[in-house]
Image: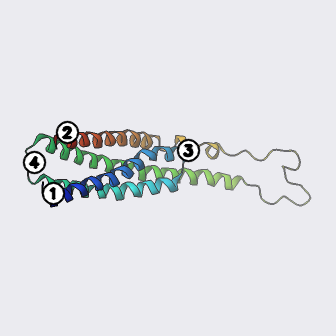
Amino acid sequence: MSTTDRLLLFLHIGFAIFTLGPLTAATMASPRYIRKGNVVVLRYLTRVTRIYGLGTLGIFLFGLFLAKGRFNQMWLSASMTLFVVALALLVLVERDQRKAAHALELAAAEAARPVEAAQPGPAPAGREPAAAEGEQEPARPAAAAATFEDVAQVERGRIAAISGVVAVIWLVILVLMIWYS
């Protein structure tokens, strides 16, 4: 193996470690933050998925340069095919992350709107606020009291399933690369 090939292999492995690790962590953490209703973190994870997903193309290109046209080998063709499948699945994950963030924003806006309308205004003259008279505060609407667990359940489940499949694909590619190289 020439020095250039060794350098490309080193870059290929390093790029794979520092790209696929954060990408897998971001996709696997998304369902947790959808369940918690944390839109800020979910938007960040969506951005990480998009950026590192595009970065995985560098891994693919380094692999193509290392292959040197030996695409007739079964393990190399299988690895490249699995990589393309994983990229397609990552597009679906990123789409579902965006849809879940949008659904969470809508649910938060929906929950905040009735609460604002139910807030008592200034007490009429000569009358103390209801809480001071021993009465309870107006009940919060059911939508505001509910957690975000019911919001974006389909997206949350799909992200969890697909990100697990993508992680297994990365592991299969790793085994193919190590076993046959």
Dot 1, how many residues are within 10 Å of its Cα: few (below 14), some (14-19), or many (20+)?
some
Residue plotted at (36% across, 50% down): 21
Look at mark 1 in the image and give the residue it sits on: 5
Q: Nearer the viewer, residue 36 or 103?
A: 36
N-term-proximal mark, 3 vs 1? 1
Look at mark 3 in the image and give the residue it sits on: 148
**Pointers 1 and 4 in contact (C-beta within 8 Å):** no
Given this view, does label 4 or label 2 mark the residue nearer the observer? 2
**Pointers 4 and 2 in contact (C-beta within 8 Å):** no
**Pointers 3 and 1 in contact (C-beta within 8 Å):** no
Relative side of 51 to 137, left or right: left
Q: Nearer the viewer, residue 55 or 44?
A: 55
N-term-proximal mark, 1 vs 2? 1
Relative side of 76 to 139, left or right: left
Residue found at the very far right of the displayed protein: 126
Kindly identify the amino acid type of the residue bearing the numbered disc 1: Asp
Look at mark 4 in the image and give the residue it sits on: 71
The residues bearing labels 1 and 4 have C-alpha atoms spaced at a distance of 17 Å
Q: Secondary structure at mark 1?
A: helix
Given this view, does label 2 or label 3 mark the residue nearer the observer? 2
The residues bearing labels 4 and 3 have C-alpha atoms spaced at a distance of 48 Å
Look at mark 2 in the image and give the residue it sits on: 179
Q: Nearer the viewer, residue 101 or 172?
A: 172
Dot 3, how many residues are within 10 Å of its Cα: few (below 14), some (14-19), or many (20+)?
many
Kindly identify the amino acid type of the residue bearing the numbered disc 4: Phe
The residues bearing labels 3 and 1 have C-alpha atoms spaced at a distance of 51 Å
Q: Secondary structure at mark 3?
A: helix
